[in-house]
Image (tube, rainbow, N blue to C red):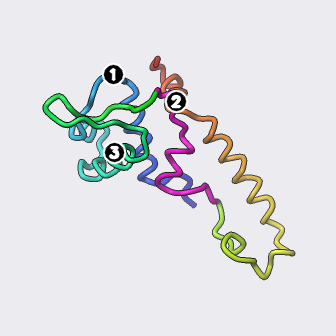
Amino acid sequence: MRLLTKNSDYAIRALLELAKTPEQCRSARELSKDLNIPYEYLRKILQQLVKDGFVQSKEGGIGGFRLARPAEEIVIADVMGIYQGPIQLSECMFRSQICANRANCVLRHNIMRIESLVQQEFKAMTVGGLLQQIGVSV
């Protein structure tokens, strides 16, 4: 079971790095080096973050990427949703069609309850809040 995909992890790390200097544009190459993420891989992640309105891009010699909104407004669950969809702890058949074992499944309601709790926790997390946890003021 994987709760956080590589794409989500890289996206969150990039957002945290950009949030450290919110007024400054950072190049993808610089971010790639600082975060130890392959450049082409990171470019695709940043392009998706631009498309979804989390990051702005500026072309030119002093261009690069920066946050499109305050770090406190960037919800981790929203970022995760871009790259991996809703949080699912099980790939049970009850998700896409009615399962033959649905009436007798002892885990179904518990799994759904746990998924809901995990989703609530990620919805409560923001990039700004994570920065504060590591001692960086925003």
Label of residue 46 in the image: 3
Q: How packed is label 3: few (under 14 Cα within 10 Å), some, or many (20 or more)?
A: many
Q: Is residue 44 left or right of residue 127?
A: left
Amino acid on which disc 2 is placed? Leu
> Is 95 above or below relative to 81?
below
Separation of residues labelled 3 and 2 (CA atoms): 19 Å
- First along the sequence among labels 3 and 2: 3
Asked whether disc 3 touches disc 2, contact meaning CB atoms under 8 Å apart, the reply is no
- Residue with the mark numbered 1: 23
Amino acid on which disc 1 is placed? Glu
Give the residue at the far top of this rendering: 137
- Residue with the mark numbered 2: 130
Amino acid on which disc 3 is placed? Leu
Q: Where in the figure is residue 65, as x and y percent of width and height?
A: 29, 35
Q: Nearer the viewer, mark 3 or mark 2?
A: 3
Separation of residues labelled 2 and 1 (CA atoms): 18 Å
80 in magenta: yes
51 in magenta: no
- First along the sequence among labels 3 and 1: 1
Q: Is residue 72 left or right of residue 43?
A: right
Q: Where in the figure is residue 8, as x and y percent of width and height?
A: 46, 49
> Is 55 above or below relative to 103?
above
